[in-house]
């Protein structure tokens, strides 16, 4: 029950943030990625806003305490090394992001908008995630 | 300062708050690609929070629409390109263990070396891709 309530609330806040910051609009995202065009810094403000909250929260609460408000351990990534998978994966993701102006959060937040191209993007993204294990084998 | 930048800063803080709430209450990183992949590939009751999170994302714009913040009515590119882009985003975020949220916000916020390198990498290839598609063709 706790998972459903706080999962829903967190998702709602995240989606509201994406929507009021215009990150749901691929044109605004592409405006940021177009360094040599009419550059639009909006995305940078979103990242600064997000970090302004998350960075102090992590360093003053999560890092020293390592557990949730309910006393359960925080599930933090334990991988430390930079490997080929990380760099190849991030590179492919960046190409797809640059082609469309859409990353996973805004893609899912856009579902209720019903824009056919974005819905197809979401479907292709889910298929891509399923195919990823085959790509991983060749890296 | 321009209104849209203030909205972007406030919006960024709200999504940062969502990510912080998820860690504060459930101890999980708010990485949308990872949450999505796990939600669709493993069926167990420990996955319910992921589905709830995704439902929250999906219904959020219905709430913001009451205050005038609406979803776009069109994509910025044609359908064939969107399908290719979707596949690349799906494969890339899975292979690279994260996207703009998990690496870009949560990972950088944690000063994770992997996330900082991932973010620099996907920003760089995205800048190059947009340069090629917008200025060379």
Image: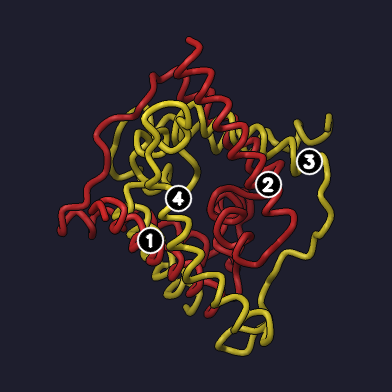
Chain colours: A yellow, B red
Instruction: Using a 10 Å C-alpha cutoff, classify the residue at mark 3 as few (fewer than 14 neighbours), some (14 to 19) or many (20 or more).
Output: some
**On what subunit does the disc labeled 3 rest?**
A
Q: Is residue B109 left or right of residue B14?
A: right
Q: Quadrant of the C terminus of chain A?
A: top right
Can marks 3 and 4 be said to lie on one chain? Answer: yes
Q: Name the residue under label 3.
A: A85
Q: Mark 2 points at which residue?
A: B118
Q: Mark 1 points at which residue?
A: B56
Residue B81: x, y in percent? 47, 20
Residue A44: mark: 4
| Cβ–Cβ under 8 Å for marks 4 and 1 | no
Residue at 34% x, 55% y is B8
Residue at 40% x, 35% y is A39
Residue A132: x, y in percent? 70, 36
Q: Distance between the residues labelled 2 and 3?
A: 10 Å
| Closest to the observer, B69 or A10 | B69
Can marks 3 and 1 be said to lie on one chain? Answer: no
- Closest to the camera, between mark 2 and mark 4, is 4
- Closest to the camera, between mark 3 and mark 4, is 4
Residue A114: x, y in percent? 29, 37
In the image, residue A51 above or below residue B2: below
Q: In this view, does A61 lie to the left or right of A7?
A: right
Residue at 54% x, 35% y is A125
């Amino acid at each position: 029950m706790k998972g459903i309530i706080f999962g829903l609330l967190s998702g709602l806040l995240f989606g509201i943030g994406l929507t009021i910051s215009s990150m749901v609009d691929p044109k605004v995202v592409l405006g940021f990625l177009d360094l040599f065009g009419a550059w639009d810094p909006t995305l940078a403000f979103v990242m600064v806003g997000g970090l302004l909250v998350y960075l102090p929260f992590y360093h003053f609460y999560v890092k020293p305490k390592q557990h949730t408000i309910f006393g359960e351990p925080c599930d933090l990534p334990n991988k430390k090394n930079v490997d080929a998978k990380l760099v190849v994966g991030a590179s492919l993701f960046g190409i797809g992001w640059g082609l469309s102006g859409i990353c996973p959060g805004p893609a899912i937040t856009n579902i209720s908008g019903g824009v056919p191209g974005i819905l197809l993007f979401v479907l292709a993204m889910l298929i891509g995630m399923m195919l990823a294990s085959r790509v991983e084998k060749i890296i | 300062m321009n209104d849209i930048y203030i909205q972007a800063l406030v919006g960024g803080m709200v999504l940062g708050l969502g990510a912080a709430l998820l860690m504060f209450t459930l101890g999980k990183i708010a990485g949308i690609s990872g949450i999505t992949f796990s939600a669709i590939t493993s069926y167990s009751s420990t996955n319910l929070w992921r589905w709830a999170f995704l439902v929250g994302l999906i219904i959020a714009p219905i709430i913001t629409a009451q205050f005038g913040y609406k979803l776009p009515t069109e994509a910025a590119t044609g359908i064939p390109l969107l399908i290719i882009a979707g596949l690349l985003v799906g494969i890339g975020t899975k292979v690279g263990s994260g996207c703009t949220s998990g690496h870009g916000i949560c990972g950088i916020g944690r000063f994770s070396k992997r996330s900082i390198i991932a973010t620099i990498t996907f920003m760089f290839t995205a800048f190059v891709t947009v340069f090629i598609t917008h200025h060379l063709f």
